[in-house]
Image: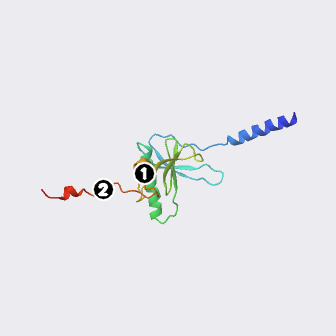
C-alpha cells in the first residue's frame, strides 16, 4: 500500500515539474520581434523589429536583415531568434524554422538556395548529392539561327 502511495506522489510531483512556465510569443498583429535571451532565471526580451508585416515570411526577411547587419559590423552570431503573431522564428545557416514554443520542435519555413538566398523549400531543386540544380536553361539553338 505504501509503495502505491509513494508511486502516486512521485508521479504527481513529476507531472507538476513538467508543467513549468513556458515562454509565449506575443500575438501583436503584424509586429515582428527579435528575441534576446534573458539573464539566468529571467524571461527573454522581445525587441520590436518591424510593424505592419503582412506574413511571417516578411518578418523572417526583416530578421535576416538584422542578422546580416550584425555580421557586417563584425559580429559572429550566426543564429537569430524572433517571433511573429504567436510563432517563434529561428534563422540559421540552413534556413528559417518556426515553432509555437521556444524549446519545442521546429518546422522548416524557408531554405537557403546555393547562393544563400531564402526560398520556399519546394521551389529549390537539388541534385542527388544535395547541390542546387540550375533552374534557367541556355537559350535553344534553333532560336539563334537567322531567318
Where residue 20 sits, quadrant-wise, is: top right
Q: Tell me the residue that label 2 is attached to.
A: 137
* Residue at the extreme top of the image, as rendered: 1
Going 81% across and 38% down the picture, which residue do you hit? 7
Could you tell me which secondary element the residue under label 1 belongs to? helix
Rate crowding at label 1 as few (under 14), some (14 to 19) or many (20 or more) other CA atoms within 10 Å: some
Q: Secondary structure at mark 2?
A: loop
As drawn, the label of residue 45 is none
Task: Write down the quadrant of residue 146 in the picture.
Answer: bottom left
Q: Quadrant of residue 16?
A: top right
- Above or below residue 100? Residue 92 is below
Considering depth in this image, is 5 or 31 the residue closer to the camera? 5
Residue ID at (76%, 40%): 13
Q: Specify whether residue 146 is in view.
A: yes
Indicate the position of residue 60 as horizontal and vertical percent values.
Answer: 45, 49
Q: Nearer the viewer, residue 38 or 72?
A: 72
Residue 69: x percent and y percent? 44, 60
Count of all numbered marks drawn on residues in the image = 2
Mark before the other along the chain sequence, 1 or 2:
1
Mark 1, residue position: 61
Q: Which quadrant holds the C terminus? A: bottom left
Amino acid at each position: 500500500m505504501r509503495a502505491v502511495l509513494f508511486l502516486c506522489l512521485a508521479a504527481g510531483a513529476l507531472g507538476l515539474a513538467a508543467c513549468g512556465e513556458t515562454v509565449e510569443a506575443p500575438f501583436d498583429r503584424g509586429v515582428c520581434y527579435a528575441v534576446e535571451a534573458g539573464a539566468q532565471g529571467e524571461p527573454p526580451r522581445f525587441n520590436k523589429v518591424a510593424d505592419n508585416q503582412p506574413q511571417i515570411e516578411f518578418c523572417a526577411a526583416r530578421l535576416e536583415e538584422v542578422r546580416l547587419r550584425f555580421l557586417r559590423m563584425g559580429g559572429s552570431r550566426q543564429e537569430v531568434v524572433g517571433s511573429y503573431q504567436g510563432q517563434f522564428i529561428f534563422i540559421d545557416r540552413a534556413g528559417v524554422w518556426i515553432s509555437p514554443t521556444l524549446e519545442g520542435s521546429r518546422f522548416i519555413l524557408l531554405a537557403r538556395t546555393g547562393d544563400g538566398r531564402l526560398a520556399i523549400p519546394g521551389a529549390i531543386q537539388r541534385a542527388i548529392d544535395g547541390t542546387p540544380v540550375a533552374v534557367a536553361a541556355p537559350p535553344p539553338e534553333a532560336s539563334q539561327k537567322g531567318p
